Image (cartoon, rainbow, N blue to C red):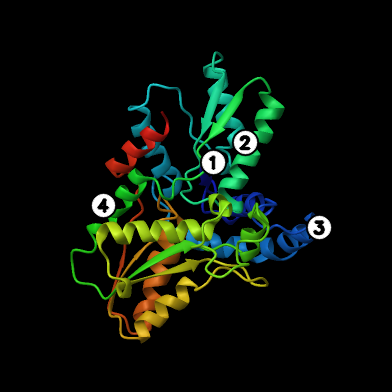
Amino acid sequence: MNLGSPESTDPKDVKVYLREFLMDEHVIDVPYWKRWLLIEGIILNTRPKKSAAAYQKIWWEEGSPLIVLSQRVFEKVSKKVEKPMELAMRYGKMSIEKGLTDLFTKNPELEEVKLIPLYPHYAKASTHSVIEKAEEIMKEKFPSKKMTYLQSFYNEENYINAQSKQLGKYLEEDYDHLLFSYHGIPERHLTKLDPTGEHCLKCDNCCEVKSEAHKVCYRHQVFETTRLIVEKLRIPKEKYSVSFQSRLAGTPWLTPYTDFEIERLAKEGKKRIVLISPAFVSDCLETLEELGMEGKEDFLKAGGEKYTLVPCLNEQEDWVETLAGYCS
């Protein structure tokens, strides 16, 4: 399972995609009437054209990079795994319902399906949304079948090894700073998922103090991924930092913000930076356009000289092998 993509770069298709994505109660978690007014009354009247223009910058001849890369990886993993498999997306026509229906129709003898959300870090708007939607469909359409799932793999050894190998190639040349950019989320998502109700953002150094909440704490998990990678590659503490990209106005989101950090680093004299986004396993709009294009432009305008974006794991053989292992 991955996120999904519009069918094309036409604003009409982008609007359809954004409506499904933003109306997800786990993405914008406010009462339905408020969410509807915000999305239908404001966002969908302006955002589709802007987003369509961004998609046009990164769209491949074969289609959406996210979809194309996910399909390529799926095909490679399928050759290594004997079990029947299907690829699906949380939003769009490659839906979870379609994926499950195809799987059980082609393999009626199946009694159990394993769901693998391709999100390394657990978050309300990603993994949580996928699992809840899949369970809803299973209960309604396939009540006699069983579903298990891989909840997260942010600290799993093979994932860390694959990320470290990918990053290591881009650190061979001299650089001034390494920025780990993770997708941002509202702070309230952390507290809503906190099973203890009293840990996330409520105690000092909450991400470092051991807690049951860490199983579903996005902030803790991205910090842990960063720690494991820098330890493996022996990156000095003063040479790297963590930031969060993408946000909506009106509520506190995780900080520092990536665009602010990119500008700050340039103004502080960091002429050569390397940026990696381990929250994504496949390149998409957020990595190719937001980080790869907008980020580079911001860095150069602020006085930077060399901006290097590390590609996502995409079709890296180590990652394909890792995914095949998750399917066992």
Q: What percent of the width, then of the height, locates residue 241?
A: 38, 71
Query: Where 62 sits versus 57, above or below?
Result: above
- Residue type for callout 2: Ala
Measure how far apart labels 2 and 4 are at the Cα level.
33 Å
Q: What percent of the width, then of the height, locates residue 120?
A: 46, 49
- Residue type for callout 1: Met
Front label number (4 vs 1):
4
Q: Earlier in the sequence, mark 2 or mark 4?
A: 2
**Residue identifier under label 2:** 134
**Residue identifier under label 1:** 89
Label 2: few (<14), some or many (≥20) within 10 Å? some
**Residue identifier under label 3:** 33
**Residue identifier under label 4:** 165
The residue drawn where x is 55% and y is 61% is: 51
Element under disc 4: helix
The residue drawn where x is 25% and y is 59% is: 233
The residue drawn where x is 65% and y is 29% is: 138
Evaluate if marks 2 and 3 touch, with contact meaning CB atoms under 8 Å apart: no
Element under disc 1: strand
Query: Where 147 sits versus 217, above or below?
Result: above
Q: Residue furthest left?
A: 173
Element under disc 3: helix
Q: Earlier in the sequence, mark 2 or mark 1?
A: 1
Front label number (2 vs 3):
2
